[in-house]
Amino acid sequence: MKQGIHPDYRPVVFRDASADFSFLTRSTAVSERTITWTDGHEYPVIDVEVSSASHPFYTGQAKVLDTAGRVERFRRRYGNRSAS
C-alpha cells in the first residue's frame, strides 16, 4: 500500500436512534460528535436511519406479496385460451 493516501481506519460507533441500537465497528467515516462507549473510551458516533434492528427484512416484519393470488387471477382470465 502507498503511504499517506488512504483515509484513517479507526473505531466508530454507528447508532440507530429509532431502534435504540448502536454498535462499535471500524470505519473510515468521520464525525464531529462523540459518544462514550461501555468500555469507557470515547468514539466518534454516526447516526443512521436504518440498521439491522429497524429494517423490516431483518426484524421479520416485511410484507410478503401475494404472488400466488396474482397467478391464479391471471389463469382465470387467460387460462385456457389457445393462440390463434
Image (tube, rainbow, N blue to C red):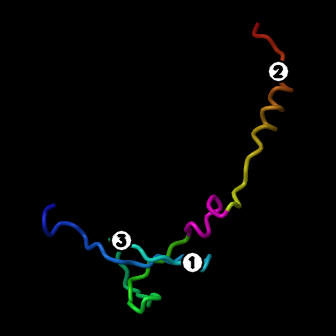
- If you read the primary sequence from the N terminus, does the residue marked by circle 3 or circle 1 appear first? 1
* x then y, percent, for residue 9: 29, 72
Residue 14 colored in magenta in the image: no
Distance from Cα at disc 3 to Cα at disc 1: 18 Å
Quarter the C terminus occupies: top right
Looking at the image, which residue is at 36% across and 77% down?
11
Q: CA distance from mark 3 to mark 2?
A: 55 Å
Local secondary structure at mark 3: strand
Tell me the tag on residue 79. 2
Q: Residue furthest front?
A: 39
**Residue receiving disc 1:** 21
> Which amino acid does the dot numbered 1 rest on?
Phe
Snapshot quadrant of residue 71: top right
**Which mark sits nearer the N-terminus, 3 or 2?**
3
Q: Position of residue 33 (x, y in %)?
A: 41, 86
Residue 51: in magenta span: yes
In the rendered structure, the answer to whether residue 62 lies left or right of residue 36 reads right
Say which mark, if any, is on residue 27.
3
**Magenta extent:** 50-59
Mark 3 burial class by Cα count in 10 Å: few <14, some 14-19, many 20+: some
Compared to 76, does 54 lie above or below?
below
Seen as rendered, the residue at the extreme right is 76
Q: Which element is circle 2 on?
A: loop
Q: Residue at 61% across / 77% down in the picture?
A: 18
Q: Amino acid at mark 3?
A: Ser
The front one of 14 and 49 is 14
Farthest top residue? Answer: 84
